[in-house]
Image (tube, grey):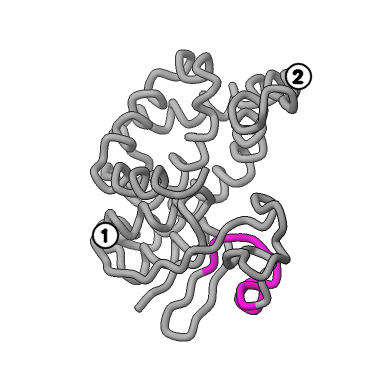
Amino acid sequence: MLTIHGCCRSRASRNIWLLEEIGMPFRHVPVIQAYRLADPGAPDAPVHTRSPAFLALNPNGHIPAMEDDGLVLHESLAINLYIAKRYGGPFGPADVAEDGLMGMWTLWAATEAEPHTIEILFNRAGKPPAERDAAKADAAVAALRAPFAVLDGALAATGWLVGGRFTVADVNVAEVIRYAMPAPELFEGAPRVKAWLAACHARPAFRRMMEAREKEPA
C-alpha cells in the first residue's frame, strides 16, 4: 500500500488531498517537523524530521516522503505528479501534451509563486505577531502581482489549468497559492484566481484533508 510520511500541517497536505480525490486507500505515517518540538531528542518525542527512521527515508530531513512498491520519493509536488500518472485516471495526464503542461504548472508554482507565497503566510499569519516582518510580506505581494496575472489569464478559457478539467495541476498550484490567502488584495486583483481557488477549496476531498489537518496539533 502506498505510504505517505508526514502530517497535514505540512506540504504533505498536497499528497493527502490528491489521494482523497482519487479515492485511493493509503497508509499515513505521522511525522512532525522537528522545529515544532521543544526537545526533539527527548525519549518520548514523536517521530519527526530528524528521527533516524525518517532520515533513512529522506536524508534531506523534510516532509513528506512517499513509499510505493519499493520506490521512495521526496518533494511533495513530484510525489503528486507520480501519483496522478500511476493512479489518478482523469486527475493525471491523458497524453504527453497534458503531461508537459502539468509539469510546467507544477514547476511554475514552485519557482514563480511559492518563494513569495510562503513569505506572506509566515509574515502575515504563520508567525507570532512579534516575529512577523511586514516589509517582507509587502515585498512578496508586489512580487506576486505579475504571476497572479499570468494565472488569472490561464484560467480564462475553462476555469481549470489543463484539459478543461480539475487535475493534479490544480491541486499542486492551489496548494501553493493557498499560502497567499492572508493577502486578499492579490485575489481582488485576479478575480479568476479567486473563483478558482474557492472552487478547489469547495471540493469534498479538500475538505476532508483540512478536517484531518484541524485534528492535528497546531
Residue 58 lies within the magenta run: yes
Q: Position of residue 137 (x, y in %)?
A: 68, 23
* Magenta-colored span: 53-65
Q: Amino acid at mark 2?
A: Ala
Badge 2 marks a residue whose secondary structure is: helix
The part of the image, by quadrant, that contains residue 53 is bottom right
Q: Is residue 214 left or right of residue 177?
A: left
Seen in the picture, residue 199 relative to 212 is either above or below; the reply is above
Q: Is residue 130 left or right of residue 121?
A: right
Q: Residues within 10 Å of mark 2 (few under 14, many from 20)?
A: few
> What residue is shown with label 1?
22
Q: On the rendered image, what quadrant is the N terminus found in?
A: bottom left
**Residue at 52% across / 40% down in the picture?**
176
**Residue at 59% across / 27% down in the picture?**
125
- Label whose residue precedes the other's in the sequence (1 or 2): 1
Label the magenta part by its dominant secondary structure.
loop
Q: Position of residue 162 (x, y in %)?
A: 35, 46
**Residue at 61% across / 26% down in the picture?**
144
Seen in the picture, residue 56 relative to 217 is either above or below; the reply is below
Q: Which mark is residue 135?
A: 2
Q: Is residue 216 left or right of residue 94?
A: right
Residue furthest bottom as drawn: 70
CA distance separating discs 1 and 2 = 40 Å
Q: Position of residue 5 (x, y in %)?
A: 50, 67
Viewer-closest of 163 and 60: 60
Badge 1 marks a residue whose secondary structure is: helix
Q: Residues within 10 Å of mark 1 (few under 14, many from 20)?
A: some
Q: Position of residue 187 (x, y in %)?
A: 46, 19
Q: Amino acid at mark 1?
A: Ile
Proximity of marks 1 and 2: CB atoms separated by less than 8 Å: no
